[in-house]
Amino acid sequence: MKEWTIRADGGGDRIGGSNYIEKDVCIDYGAIQDNKRISYPPMAREEIPLFILSHDHLDHCGGVPIFAREHPESKILMTQTTYEGMLLQLRDSLKIMSVTAKNRTRRGLNPEQVVFDYRDVERLANRVEFVKNTDWFEPIPGYKMSFRSAGHKPGAVMILMVCPDGTRVIHACDVSLDDQALVKGASVPSDFLEPDIMVVESTYGDREIPDRHKEESKLIKIAKTVFKRGGKVVMPHFGSTMGNVAFPVAKAGLATYIDGMGRDFLSMYQNTKPWCGEDKPFSLKDFPSLSFVNGGSPKGDMLVREELIQQKGPVVIVSTSGMLEGGPSVFYTEELIEDRRNASVVPGYQASGTQGRKMVQLQRGDQISFVHQDKFGEEKTVTKKILADVIQVKLSGHSGGDKMAKWIAQINPKKVVTVHGEPSSHEGLKERTHRLSKNISFFSAKNGQTLEFAF
Ligand SMILES: [Zn+2]
Ligand SMILES: [Zn+2]
């Protein structure tokens, strides 16, 4: 008899803090971001021979230094792109933690407990082993594995695994089936059909998302309209997927500048060899109208930013953070929002409690206050009137429910465990898949609960 268990300590029936323990293997240890507070899933106390990081989004990688410190016995595996991206994210988190601690001390509050520091990140960096390609290998005794592109972002993997008792498992979280600027959509692993178990994300399990090509055309149309009226477009966006919004407008020949973490991620993609055929190599040379904001130093960067705002001609500026919670995007938005010729194009997903969410809920003519840190690390509030267009564009690294259901039905696992979604999304993905195939049994992972299977 074959046996298999999964426990989602985070990222089961909600998004955030992804952490999946599947027998001897732990996948991801992410941060939970809730109304500006960061926490982490409860730490697994059992011995974990193998830890795999699926990709470098904070909800998957944000707590890996803590996991590595608590689990010196674990072998740690990821692709090189994920490793480089994880280090960018973690070093940025350390910077934010240090500024937050300074501000709390200044206000006479106790500094929050330090969860990890520079040394933890460096120790983790020295322990990581790279997955170099999609070949089958045996990372720990008895487990055969092959990593495939998850299509979600460069470096992101789905894991095919044969356990020592022969149980065949696919772990696919997070996934996109649509081609994106820097990575092709995930394919059906034709050498691994009908596995015993498929663990799969359900982010949009109960919804469809707009067609990617239509959204890209919408984006180009908005930018061209703004250029015609002599305005500027500011696009707050997430660092690791900035290419999704920057490349379509740059390809259309519109002058585009990249700033913040997006600049760091794109430089990293330029310098890191893709680990598989699905990741597309990136070179700035292929985009003559694309430039990085690069003043050579933080002070120099600030001067370039001010020049961009002052310059007469139209321009597209893409910068982190995507939800206007810090980073240069707050500066650009403050400077450009009071001019009717301009537009702010924000990502479709804006978490509750963020300044980005506040802005998309307000009307033209309303006032908005941005709270951010100035160059000395002091908190500053700036109130502006919204006169520019505020538009949301939905270019996601996930796929809608119907596409995901079709993909699952093609792979045709015996059992599916849904993770990474609200309960309604788990239910939606199950219903959609059952319209195509009634033989697949569905189980929904709930945080902290162990699911046990015997075959
Ligand atoms: Zn992700
Ligand atoms: Zn995720």
Image (cartoon, grey):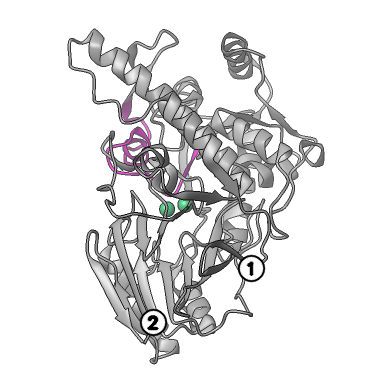
Q: Nearer the viewer, mark 1 or mark 2?
A: 1
Give neighbour class at mark 1: few <14, some 14-19, many 20+ (Cα, 10 Å): few
> Is residue 41 highlighted in magenta?
no
Q: Which mark is residue 136?
A: 1
What is the three-letter code of the residue carrying label 1?
Trp
Number of callouts in the render?
Answer: 2
Relative to 129, residue 335 above or below: above
Residue 236 visible, this orientation: no
| 78 and 109: which is toward the camera | 78
Which residue is found at the position 24% from the left and 48% from the top?
A: 42
Residue 222 visible, this orientation: yes
The image position of residue 228, as x and y in percent, is 67, 35
Q: Which residue is mark 2?
A: 415
The image position of residue 348, as x and y in percent, is 44, 49
| Label 1 to label 2: alpha-carbon separation | 23 Å
First to last magenta residue range: 345-368
The image position of residue 25, as x and y in percent, is 42, 60
Q: Which mark is residue 282?
A: none
